[in-house]
Amino acid sequence: MLFPKQTYVERRRVLAERIGSGLILLFGNNNSPANYPGNAYKWRQDSTFLYYFGLQREGLCGVIDCDEARVWLIGDDIDIDDIVWFGSVASVADMAGECGADCCAPMSKLEKLVKEAIAAGRRVHFLPQYRHDLMIQLMDLTGIHPARQREMASLELIHAVCDQRACKSAEEIAEIERACEIGYKMHTTAMRMVSPAVTEQEIAGTISGIAESYGCKVSFQSIVSMHGEIMHGYPSPKRLESGRLLLCDCGAETNENYCSDNTRTTPVDGVFTQRQREIYSIVEECHDFALTLCKPGVRWWDVHFGVCRLMTERLKELGLMRGDVDAAVAAGAHAMFMPHGLGHMMGLDVHDMEGFGQTIIGFDEETQPRLDQFGTNCLRFGRRLQEGFVMTDEPGIYFIPALIDDWRAKGHCAEFIDFDLLETYKDFGGIRLEDDVLITADGCRFLGKEIIPYHIDDVEEFKLNKK
């Protein structure tokens, strides 16, 4: 277990007190076969189970009985066949003692606990499930079909978990810092490798090895591509080409599954061309401008659109955009160049708690997403920042040929975009810069002991000297 037992006891106490009554089910993950049962994907514990129980073993479920103030750890002990192949592990009773659970029982007990609660008219609280085996188990326990489980999940529990997990404790921040240190090694290694002599896959494979050698794994499938205009441009076997840019968006998970997430864009030749420098400098300015705005009480919605206005102003100076800045942003014209939100929460999930639903974790009654507007519909977060939030700051500018053709054909936002000039950027690619920041009492700060080079001169000097 990463943190002291009392940390998990207190987290569960706070959760039970807020929910008040009923039974809370928190499922851990099972093994997931890749192509047959004996060949499984690398196992990863469910983040919420990990947050409240801290146990790294498959096949467990935590049950919090709010009415009786009792916590159960449910799971079967492994048998001799498993021990032969995988070695001995702690018994469920020992794990219950480690995490401070009051009781333990085999998995067969779970059905009895749930059926008794339902028969007594008590509420059974559960979270939306994202793995089909657990959806089936939940259906067997409650009778709720997987197609209806998301709508039937407990909103009270979702909001309570979100509120607890959103503000990171000092011990959690220290663990995220460790993930950022691994991320620093990954990104600086990738930057050193960037040259016409290597392929995208070579770089991606090397940084994945770093993530696994220092921690658990990459925090998401690494994006390593000369086609930075593709939001999820996964690595290909192509060799890097002189004159292009390589966008690398990757992160690491520590052995306890706290995450990092950074993006850097590096010139293949080590030096930016004039056109690349012009676009990069806008992204760099937007990245740093966001940091000046972030502090408790400020709406992330306002940070995002503050960056969008600055980006629009700078693109006007290059002649790519025109007209009134506020009108252009209100119309969503800036989304031609940045069709995503400024950033997201990060913690035990790289997109922290996004599985509960984008609108639930990222928005409230004060800020509601515009799901009807391209670009704004991809804003993952909008509500007011609080001390202890961990956010990513990731502006970008992209030139997406198909999007350019689509908007031009429709005349969409034509009053704000110079499509003739934009046509000459179709072979540009894209640029994104991303860092992980902690919201502090009076502002924000970078996470990680060392900052991955991102200012233009620093990137070129890093490539020249190969530090």
Image: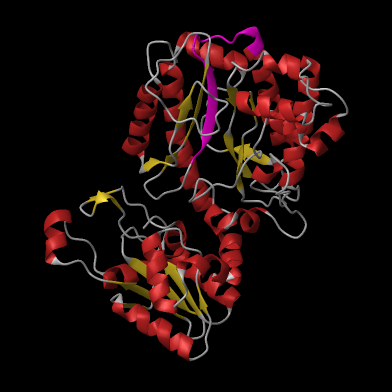
In the rendered image, residue 109, in percent from the top left (x then y), is placed at 32, 81
Tell me the quarter of the image containing the N terminus: bottom left
In the picture, measured across the screen, residue 144 lies left or right of residue 412, that is: left
In the rendered image, residue 262, in percent from the top left (x then y), is placed at 53, 33
Q: Is residue 62 visible?
A: no
Magenta segment boundaries in residue numbering: 260-275
Residue 9 vs 454, above or below: the answer is below
Q: Is residue 212 visible?
A: yes
Residue 66 vs 245, above or below: the answer is below
Residue 254 vs 425, above or below: the answer is below
In the rendered image, residue 359, in percent from the top left (x then y), is placed at 65, 55
Residue at point 75%, 53% (across, down): 367
Residue 436: quarter of image: top right
In the picture, measured across the screen, residue 403 lies left or right of residue 210, that is: right
In the picture, measured across the screen, residue 196 lies left or right of residue 368, that is: left
Q: Is residue 128 magenta?
A: no
Residue 295 vs 451, above or below: the answer is below
Q: Is residue 274 magenta?
A: yes
